[in-house]
Image: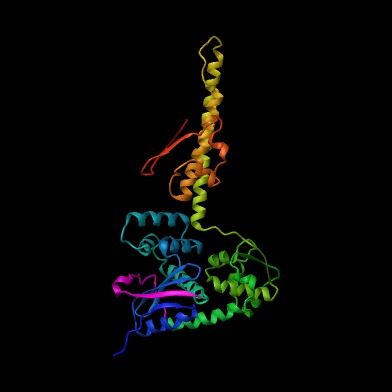
Amino acid sequence: MAIKEQIKGKSTGEGVLKYFQNISADRKNGIFVLKTKEGKEIQILFYDGKIIYAESDVKNRDRAILTYLSECGIIDKKVKTKILKKKEKSKGVSIISLLIEEKPGTEDEMGQALRARTQEILIELLMSEEVSFEFIEKGKGEIGFNPKIYRPMNTDSIIFDAARIIDELKNALEPAKVYENIPSLSGTIDVETAKKLRIPWEFIEYIDGKSAIIEIARKSRKPVYETMIYISELSKNELVEIERSKELRSEEERDKRWEIIKLSFKNIIAFLFIGFTGVFLYGLTSSNSKEKIKIFDPFEVIKVEKQKLKIKTAIESYKTLEGRYPDSLLLLVEKGLLEKKDLTFPINRLYYYKKSEDDTYYELGL
């Protein structure tokens, strides 16, 4: 009696190829889960022995798919936000179904982009020095893929293409392999030159001296590895220079920064309103010189209200970054959102702060 092989263990990236071939030969259905030495988790979906889709951000796959399609220019930021809100309300409905409903007629475009994404992840996986892996068999119904978007890919063809691409990447110039690097044209390129170098002519227009390699890939809708090979080829022929790198922020980080900017703008408006109100009150009290009752200096009120707004902005920024309100105002100092003196100015003692047990609101006062 033959012993069934358990698909689980550790290997190099290229070492898992034989398991892909076994799954393909046995026409299995399931999820191939891999973890790289750096801690990244990759999931590859198999249906009837063929690869459907791969994703490296498995903790937030829906956001990862939408971010990729947004970077490729297939959907815009408004559509992305709308789809994510719909997904929160529509439990059990796939992100792909929501996309087709929102953007009918773009199934082929989306499918092509997600296949390119799958190839990118497979290339990255195969170049890994060490991975742990496990194949989890599933029923066909449990895989749950939309055939309008996900077209099963022949495993043997993908492996062959991956091996060829890896060889080409090994021969590519090192600066072209760093996707944060910014290439710029250093010579004139015509259609014939591009054809001779086997580079699509329309790809050239995206090399603007401002976009990083990964941005060029997304805008031109080419896989990152393919873009690296093109840039390397142009560099070898002294048609492109690669001189500097660019700090790339994730879509989620950009969203957080924008929320903080909007919050700060709102608080500036509120401060101006308080300032004008304080000056008005000061004018009223100073005009009555016979008043003997001593009142709190309205300019001190303005200082306190201004400082409270500053602290509130830091509190809301903390929540935007951490997902919760701080347990103490001192955490704002540790996070670098405020200086320690900001917690006592101008009253020479700590401001009163308390958040609710369910973390839905907080109190800030004297």
The percent position of residue 290, horizontal first and vertical second, equals 54, 9
Magenta stretch, residue numbers: 130-154
Q: Residue at x 41, y 84 (%)?
A: 21
The percent position of residue 73, horizontal first and vertical second, equals 50, 62
Q: Quadrant of residue 333?
A: top right
Above or below, comparing residue 323 to residue 245 in the picture:
above
For this orientation, the residue located farthest to the bottom is 1
Q: Nearer the viewer, residue 55 or 205?
A: 55
Q: Nearer the viewer, residue 312 or 205?
A: 312
Residue 152 within the segment the image draws in magenta: yes
Q: Could you tell me if residue 190 is visible in this image?
A: no
Apparent side of residue 148 relative to residue 309 in the rendered image (left or right): left
The percent position of residue 168, horizontal first and vertical second, equals 58, 80
Residue 365 within the segment the image draws in magenta: no
Q: Quadrant of the N terminus?
A: bottom left
Q: Residue at x 49, y 80 (%)?
A: 14
Above or below, comparing residue 297 to residue 353 in the picture:
above
Q: Could you tell me if residue 129 is visible in this image?
A: yes
The percent position of residue 55, horizontal first and vertical second, equals 44, 68
Above or below, comparing residue 346 to residue 216 in the picture:
above
Above or below, comparing residue 320 to residue 302 in the picture:
below
